[in-house]
Image: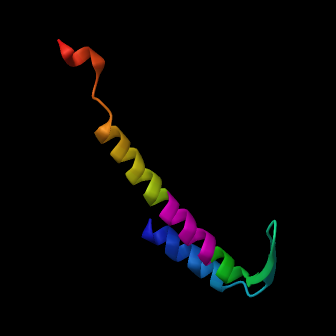
Amino acid sequence: MIALLVIAFIFGSQNNQMLTLNYMIARTELSVAAAVSLFTTIGFFLGIFFALLWKFVRLVKPKSINNKG
């Protein structure tokens, strides 16, 4: 996972073009390196968050109704 992050940052640093990001209420200009870094980092943290949330839900959820026996 760390290797993929490093590759993404290297790819972004080799591109110095500017991007225009249009939001619903705003517009900003970022370099490709900043955009790749930003979105890779956001994706990494969202992945960690949902993986931990999934583990928590499976831990709290009752194991099985059939095990009442």
Does residue 45 belong to the magenta stretch?
yes
Farthest bottom residue?
Answer: 16
> Residue drawn at (41%, 50%), measured in percent from left and top?
53
Residue at point 56%, 63% (across, down): 43
**Residue 50: within the magenta?**
no
Q: Is residue 62 left or right of residue 44?
A: left
Quarter of the figure that contains the C terminus: top left
* Residue 22 quadrant: bottom right
Between 38 and 7, the residue placed more toward the observer is: 38
**Residue pictured at 74% horizontal, 83% vertical:** 30
How far across and down, in percent of the image, does residue 13 sit?
A: 64, 85
Q: Position of residue 59 (x, y in %)?
A: 29, 41
- Give the residue at x 57% y 79%: 9
- Image coordinates of residue 45 in percent, x first then y, are 49, 65
Which corner quadrant holds the N terminus? bottom left
Residue 32 is left or right of residue 52, and the answer is right
Image quadrant in which you'd find residue 38: bottom right
Q: Nearer the viewer, residue 21 or 8?
A: 21
The residue most toward the front is 25
In the image, 66 versus 38, the foreground residue is 66
Secondary structure character of the magenta stretch overall: helix
The region drawn magenta spans 37-46
Splitting the image into 4 quarters, where does residue 25 fall?
bottom right
